[in-house]
Image (tube, rainbow, N blue to C red):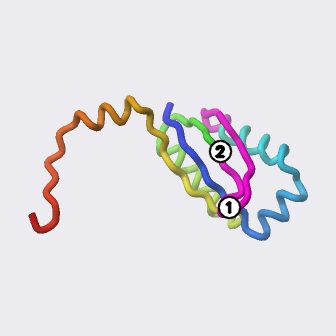
């Protein structure tokens, strides 16, 4: 199953909701959501700085990952950035592919 890294930043309203709900309850809600989409959560951490939460999770495909991102982002309470995670073996396979790229102006 493909794995993804979410970086999330809470809006003011999202932070108010997190303070009201609590961190562990929010983590449990997110975990249930992802499990309900056929996936699993590998790691869930709160942080501070530019990002408030980081989640590593797996779901069946990129369409499911996109649906999750759109649903959360449209709430207006959290802004997500989702990154696909690739294994070293994924990179090895990509490195062996021939790509007929022509640089601009070449």
Figure check: 93 above or below 50: above
For this view, does 100 lie left or right of residue 97?
left
Say which residue appears at 61% left-offset and 58% top-offset.
80
Task: Please tell me whether mark 1 sits on a helix, a strand or a loop.
Answer: strand
**101 in the magenta segment:** no
Query: Does the CB distance between marks 2 and 1 fall below 8 Å?
Result: no
C-alpha span from label 2 to label 1: 12 Å
For this view, does 56 lie left or right of residue 92?
right
Magenta extent? 35-55
Task: Please tell me whether mark 2 sits on a helix, a strand or a loop.
Answer: strand
Crowdedness of circle 2 by 10 Å Cα count: few (<14), some, many (20+)? many
Residue at numbered disc 1: 9
Say which residue appears at 79% left-offset and 40% top-offset.
28
Sequence order check, earlier mark of 2 and 1: 1
- View extreme (front): residue: 49
Q: Position of residue 33 (x, y in %)?
A: 70, 42
Q: Which mark is residue 55?
A: 2
Q: Which mark is residue 43?
A: none
89 and 60: which is toward the camera: 89
Q: Position of residue 79 (x, y in %)?
A: 64, 62
Q: Position of residue 46 (x, y in %)?
A: 74, 50
Hey, which quadrant is residue 29 in on the image? Answer: top right
- View extreme (left): residue: 106
Q: Quadrant of the C terminus?
A: bottom left
Hey, which quadrant is residue 34 in on the image? Answer: top right
Figure check: 39 above or below 100: above
Q: Position of residue 31 (x, y in %)?
A: 72, 39
């Amino acid at each position: 199953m493909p794995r993804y890294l979410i970086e999330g930043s809470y809006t003011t309203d999202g932070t108010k909701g997190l303070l009201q709900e609590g961190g562990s309850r929010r983590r449990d809600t997110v975990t249930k959501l992802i499990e309900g989409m056929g996936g699993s959560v590998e790691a869930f951490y709160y942080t501070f700085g530019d990002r408030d939460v980081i989640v590593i999770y797996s779901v069946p495909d990129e369409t499911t990952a996109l649906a999750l991102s759109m649903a959360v982002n449209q709430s207006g309470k959290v802004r997500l950035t989702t990154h696909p995670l690739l294994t070293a073996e994924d990179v090895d396979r990509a490195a062996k592919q021939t790509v007929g790229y022509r640089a601009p102006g070449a």
